[in-house]
Amino acid sequence: VQLVESGGGLVQAGGSLRLSCAASGFAFSMFTMSWYRQAPGKERELVANISSTGDNTNYAESVKGRFTISRDNAKDTVYLQMNTLKPEDAAVYYCKAMGPFSGVTYWGKGTLVTVSS
């Protein structure tokens, strides 16, 4: 099982980034996918999640209207489009897969997003 995040980097405040998380080794289309983030000295927090079919999404209040989560089940990939980035969005962003049964969960290793003011 692998979840590999990519797309992080350095961006100026107000800019955009698109994160990707490529999955392998499990039935991706059956899993709810989420993006979490963790800033230095802070707890990991949920940013957004998307149902297995992509029909339902949820966002943290702090990112509503700026971030969009999506998935392509044909490519076993979930995305996070991040617009109007703020310095407080800087963090390591992690991808998480949660299975439909027994709560099986997989995590990626993260990708770093840095936002300069």
Image: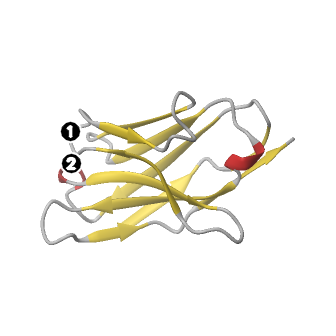
36, 76: nearer the viewer: 36
Place of residue 4 in the rendered image (x, y in percent of width and height, measured from the top left): 47, 60
Q: Where 53 falls versus 35 (above or below)?
A: above
Q: Which mark is residue 29?
A: 2
Q: CA distance from mark 1 to mark 2?
A: 7 Å
Q: Where 10 falls versus 101 (above or below)?
A: above
| Residue in the picture at 63% in, 30% down | 83
Tally of marks:
2
Q: Amino acid at mark 1?
A: Thr
Place of residue 110 in the rendered image (x, y in percent of width and height, measured from the top left): 56, 63
**Residue 24, quarter of picture:** bottom left
Q: Amino acid at mark 2?
A: Ser
Badge 1 or badge 2: first in the primary sequence: 2
SS assignment at label 1: loop
Q: Which residue is mark 1?
A: 53
Whether residue 111 sits left or right of residue 13 in the image: it is: left
Assess whether mark 2 and mark 1 are in contact (beta carbons under 8 angstroms).
Answer: yes
Place of residue 91 in the rendered image (x, y in percent of width and height, measured from the top left): 67, 57
Label 1 crowd (10 A; few <14 / some 14-19 / many >=20): few
| Residue in the picture at 65% in, 68% down | 42
| Residue in the picture at 27% in, 65% down | 25
**Residue 3, quarter of picture:** bottom left
Place of residue 72 in the rendered image (x, y in percent of width and height, measured from the top left): 32, 38
SS assignment at label 2: helix
Label 2 crowd (10 A; few <14 / some 14-19 / many >=20): some
Q: Where 17 falls versus 33 (above or below)?
A: above
| Residue in the picture at 71% in, 52% down | 90
